[in-house]
Image: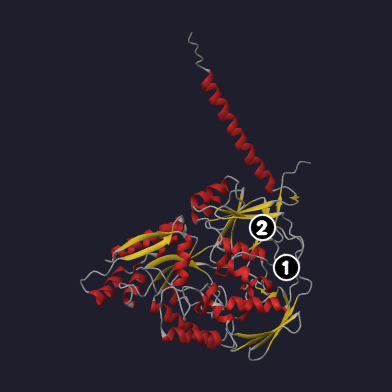
């Protein structure tokens, strides 16, 4: 016999739908209530990142994963606030610098231990600085570290640094270099031993998925309020945003501008601009590519790119367009020079005609990070701008690890879209350190005697804020604009999005997370 139940299925669907809506509403309500609730003990903060950790390149600090580990697991000798370049005590409690800058005496904090229980001493300072100075380890301030010719460790709590030349960015170095256990140098370099003195320990790593970072209950600044941090790899910008919205993540620093715009004002989230970290988006150009060897072609590209469109469409107007790397508060900032490259297609075509006449230049690949909607959109705009002035191009999406390897090795085939920092430090640091700018060896394979000389002069200026130093910065700005091997595009705001129940999240000048005093709030059930 054929039994029919015509109303059961629709009713069941309706009930399930109602239950689902009610469940979602309840979850949202709980999250909203938690944001205004009392502090709760412990908890694990979940950090989303577009790419996985690569322990062997931890020094580079170029990804959220690298910055999370270096910021949470390790400490540095001194610290900067995000507001200025005045060094503050870290593992070094105090210091003296000789008049010529070639002797720096660091008085170290006693009673600090590494996560393996070993005591922190001057021997660890010597080992950490020497290891960072090795250029094969990807430390971007390796040239500065290499100026340290000796570290006297006679006193276990005093490290006396001898430098071959006095430079004005030594404390930039001390703010950046993670202090490692002298006995763990080989393991650190192999990526098998991650042992610091920081607020969180390196726990269990599930490559490609997540990294567990339990709290260091013996932290010298005081035990963290959280139980742990967990880094979760989400290799797609849209999925990262979706997981944040659904409550699966608590912190996202890799979100796009549209995501920050969408969540700004949403009481389930907190959107803050990380002031003082200043990471710019740029277009790099390999000067050995046949189409890019002549600086006039590179300059033409500078005039062809529509920075206003990138700022408006990609960043929702959150930031400013720029021709030079410097933030507005830097002594190297020049408002007029910063407007040098604005959209001028006719000027771009005229420069190209000087070089090639009526002939076509070779096709230019434009590389960008696959999975990054932001970089993809910028690359598409750049490619369209190149086509508009008669330059042929093709989009070249690459995995994050490949992009970083090409950046460090100067191995990009043509052009690439990427971000850089270091302009927030002493104006000498960027041109003698950062992979895209290093006057000795950079990602563009650009070599220029005048640029190298000006970079060195700025580095050794006794007072980096003096009128004489500012004159050098202006000349160096001219070198950058004329050489056009790095074309700055936008200085975007640097949004950090957290769930609103997470409080007191801080960050370093290098944009590393500081969760040492972070805590959650929960529902008030009293």
Rendering colour mode? secondary structure
How far is disc 1 from disc 2 in space, using C-alphas? 14 Å
**Circle 1 SS class:** loop
Foreground residue, 316 or 461?
A: 461
Q: Find residue 158 and report its horizontal and vertical position in percent.
A: 74, 82
Foreground residue, 98 or 228?
A: 228
State yes or no: discs 1 and 2 in contact (Cβ < 8 Å): no
Q: Which residue is mark 1?
A: 114
Q: Which residue is mark 2?
A: 203
Q: Which mark is residue 35?
A: none
Furthest residue toward top: 1
**Circle 2 SS class:** loop
Image quadrant assignment for residue 66: bottom right
Along the horizontal axis of the image, is 108 left or right of 54? right
Along the horizontal axis of the image, is 3 left or right of 524? left
Say if residue 490 shows up in the picture: no
Q: Find residue 109 and report its horizontal and vertical position in percent.
A: 76, 75
Furthest residue toward left: 358
Along the horizontal axis of the image, is 159 left or right of 341? right
């Amino acid at each position: 016999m054929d039994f029919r139940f015509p109303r059961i299925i629709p009713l069941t669907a309706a009930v399930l739908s109602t239950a689902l809506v009610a469940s979602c509403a309840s979850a949202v309500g709980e999250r909203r209530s938690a944001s205004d609730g009392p502090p709760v003990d412990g908890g694990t903060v979940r950090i989303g990142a577009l790419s996985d950790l690569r322990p062997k390149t931890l020094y580079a600090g170029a990804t959220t994963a690298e910055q999370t580990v270096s910021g949470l697991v390790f400490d540095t000798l001194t610290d900067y606030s995000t507001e200025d370049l005045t060094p503050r005590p870290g593992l070094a409690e105090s210091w003296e610098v000789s008049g010529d800058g070639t002797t720096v005496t660091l008085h170290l904090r006693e009673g600090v231990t590494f996560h393996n229980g070993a005591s922190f001493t001057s021997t660890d300072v010597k080992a950490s600085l020497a290891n960072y100075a090795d250029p094969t380890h990807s430390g971007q301030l390796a040239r500065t570290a290499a100026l340290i010719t000796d570290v006297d460790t006679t006193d276990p709590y005093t490290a006396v640094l001898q430098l071959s030349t006095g430079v004005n960015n030594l404390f930039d170095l001390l703010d950046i270099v993670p202090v490692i256990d002298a006995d763990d140098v080989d393991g650190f370099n192999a990526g098998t031993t991650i042992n610091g003195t920081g607020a969180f320990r390196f726990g269990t790593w599930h490559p490609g998925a997540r990294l567990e970072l339990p709290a260091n209950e013996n932290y010298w600044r005081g035990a963290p309020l959280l139980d742990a941090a967990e880094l979760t790899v989400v290799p797609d910008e849209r999925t990262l945003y979706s997981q944040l919205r659904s409550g699966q993540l608590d912190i996202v620093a890799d979100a796009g501008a549209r995501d920050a715009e969408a969540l700004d004002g949403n009481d389930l989230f907190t959107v803050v601009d990380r002031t003082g970290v200043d990471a710019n988006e740029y277009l790099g150009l390999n000067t050995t590519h046949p189409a890019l060897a002549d600086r006039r072609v590179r300059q033409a590209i500078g005039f062809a790119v529509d920075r206003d469109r990138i700022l408006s469409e990609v960043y929702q107007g959150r930031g400013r367009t720029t021709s030079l790397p410097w933030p507005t508060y830097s002594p190297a900032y020049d408002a007029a020079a910063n407007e040098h490259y604005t959209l001028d297609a006719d000027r771009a075509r005229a420069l190209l005609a000087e070089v090639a006449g009526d002939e076509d230049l070779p096709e230019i690949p434009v590389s960008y990070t696959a999975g990054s909607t932001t970089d993809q959109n910028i690359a598409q705009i750049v490619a369209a701008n190149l086509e508009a002035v008669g330059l042929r191009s093709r989009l070249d999406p690459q995995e994050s690890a490949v992009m970083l390897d090409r950046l460090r090795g100067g191995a990009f085939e043509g052009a690439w879209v990427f971000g850089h920092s270091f302009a927030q430090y002493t104006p000498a640091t960027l041109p003698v350190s950062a992979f895209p700018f290093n006057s000795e060896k950079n990602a563009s394979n650009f070599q220029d005697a005048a640029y190298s000389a000006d970079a060195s002069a700025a580095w050794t200026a006794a007072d980096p804020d003096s009128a004489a130093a500012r004159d050098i910065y202006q000349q160096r700005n001219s070198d950058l604009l004329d050489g056009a091997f790095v074309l700055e595009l936008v200085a975007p705001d640097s949004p950090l999005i957290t769930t609103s129940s997470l409080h007191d999240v801080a960050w370093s000048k290098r944009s590393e997370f500081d969760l040492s005093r972070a805590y959650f709030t929960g529902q008030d059930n009293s």
